[in-house]
Image (cartoon, rainbow, N blue to C red):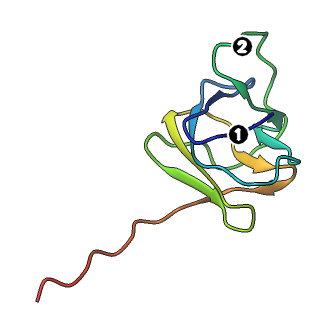
Amino acid sequence: MELRPGTRLESTTCQAQLVVVRAPTATDFDLRCGGEPLQPLGTGGERKPLSSAGESVQLGKRYAHEELGLELLCTRPGEGSLSIGDEPLFLLGAKPLPASD
């Protein structure tokens, strides 16, 4: 699946929906939610049971894989956890604001 900034994805295991904020140059990776591959939004198909437990996807939070240069924004929360293969994606923290002196 080719990812570009703005691509909308959905989970096949829960209600989670994501938007690609930053896309990697490599396209050979296995992006998953709840242990099952993500699919383009609106593709349809039947829901599969969660096959991996972990931290659920939170609304409005950004998830990233720094080595690949991938960043995703959650637009609908879900029970599944995001990963590339078996390696989890990490929740990005807030950037510190500049000093106002």
Along the polypeptide, which appears first: circle 1 or circle 2? 1
Label 1 Cα crowd, 10 Å radius (few <14 / some 14-19 / many 20+): some
Q: Along the line of sight, which residue is nearer the eye, 75 or 56?
A: 75
Amino acid of disc 1: Leu
- Picture residue at 63% right of the left edge, 34% below the top: 79
- The residue to which callout 2 is attached is 43
Q: How many marks?
A: 2
SS of the residue under disc 1: loop
Residue 7 in the image, given as x and y percentages of width and height: 61, 33
Locate residue 94 relative to residue 52 in the image: left or right: left
Q: Along the line of sight, which residue is nearer the eye, 2 or 18?
A: 2
Locate residue 59 relative to residue 11 in the image: left or right: left
- The residue to which callout 1 is attached is 3
Q: From the viewer's perspective, is residue 26 above or below residue 81?
A: below
Residue 1 in the image, given as x and y percentages of width and height: 81, 33
Residue 16 in the image, given as x and y percentages of width and height: 60, 30
Residue 39 in the image, given as x and y percentages of width and height: 74, 26
Residue 37 falls in image quadrant: top right
- Picture residue at 74% right of the left edge, 23% below the top: 12
Q: Along the line of sight, which residue is nearer the eye, 62 or 19?
A: 19
Residue 44 falls in image quadrant: top right
Q: From the viewer's perspective, is residue 18 above or below residue 12?
A: below
Amino acid of disc 2: Thr
